[in-house]
Amino acid sequence: MPAVVAPRQRLAKDETRPHLPVPEAIGWETTLACNMRCRHCGSTAGAVRGSELDAEQAQSLCRQIVGLEVPRVCLTGGETLMRRDWRQIVGTLLEGDVEIGLLTNGWSLVGKTLRELSSYAGCPFYLSVSLDGTREVHDRIRALPGSFDRAVRGAMELKAMGVPVAVITTINHANVDTLPGLREVIFGQLKPYCWQLQTANMFGRAVEFGDDCRISQVEYARGVCFTVETRRLAEGTGMAIHAGDCMGYLGTLEPQLRDSPWPGCQAGLEIIGIQSNGDVKGCLSIIDDRFVEGNAFAEGIETVWNRPGAFSYNRAFREGMLHGTCAGCPVGDVCRGGCTAAAVSSKGGPHDAPYCLRAVEVAARPAKPVKRKRKVQPRRESRP
């Protein structure tokens, strides 16, 4: 039986899908600078992006976010902890009652930086650290020996200081076999409040290391099943297991994969992403300049968010936009072709999911036997 999905009201011809008055959450790429060169990095992080917002402009952006009363912001990169003014950014947002998540590769979780982060214990602040396999595989993916141990050690120390710590794992061909071993480390040592599992999108450096990063349909299904199994094992531990938006899509395992069914991509409906130069997209994971809707510093977040015609791939979605694997899908009006970033990275555009567990399930169903018509032999007349 497929997952039960609440029907959505179909939109009139000129109607647009409703979006929130202000974004529920903002992903802010504070810098493209990074101290690692990860194989799966879609942003090809390393050097500073051209025309990145300086400290004064970043504070202006913080004031916009506070003024709009955006509830949550995720600071990401590159590596946010490489910005000299990261403390000022965090401070201004916290003073404005904005909940902050900071995503890090973990290399900077030592010394002074670790002590400074510990000062946010008790604040609406949490840290997410990336772990992409067991020690050897993680270090190879991250192209930096010792990065696994340093990230785990720093995260455990920060957790002991009272700062909530989460883990994010990007599943790819190179690490899918190590997931059970990584789970032993996470459940047995780190014990974060949340573990998010997601699959790699084929942008940037992931394309260069294609064989290592690209997963097969079978590996994708294994990743989803592993996430379902891990959710079951985490019951009663206080650890939340979260499936990324690139996983699932309303198949039989959907109720076991998420607390509530996949509602479709929320880019431009509930969330937005802001690049380090101020450019706005529906989601930072859509690494394609065709999806830039405006600039938060030059025009303002509110202006871009409310611009007629913006984020049309979601706000003006119609079932007729579905194509490829998703064309004619019975839950297409809700799913809208899965994760937009995944579709753009692998198919060149939205509304055609490159990976879908429902599609895998349908393909795996045994074919119905063909009923062959019995040939009726002509009746022979008996001879006298």
Image (tube, grey):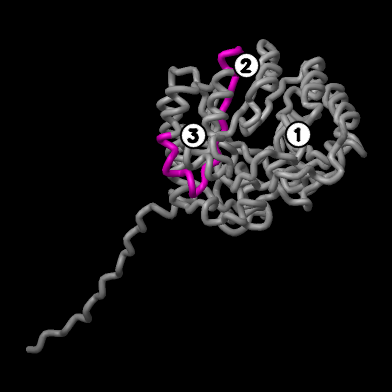
Residue 104 image offset from top left, x and y in percent: 65, 31
Q: Tell me the tag on residue 166.
A: none
Measuring 57% from the left and 17% from the top, which residue is drawn there?
159
> Mark 3 or mark 2, which has the lower sequence index?
2
Report whether 133 appears left or right of 276.
left
Q: Is residue 96 above or below residue 295?
A: above
Range shown magenta = 158-181
Identify residue type, mark 1: Trp
Q: Give the quarter of the image for residue 25.
A: top right
**Residue 159 is covered by the magenta coloring:** yes
Q: What residue sits right under mark 1 in the picture?
A: 28
Q: Give the quarter of the image for residue 145.
A: top right
Of 277 and 371, nearer the camera is 277
Pick out the residue farthest to the top: 122
Measuring 87% from the left and 30% from the top, which residue is drawn there?
55
Q: What residue sits right under mark 2 in the picture?
A: 163
Residue 324 image offset from top left, x and y in percent: 59, 59
Pick out the residue farthest to the left: 384
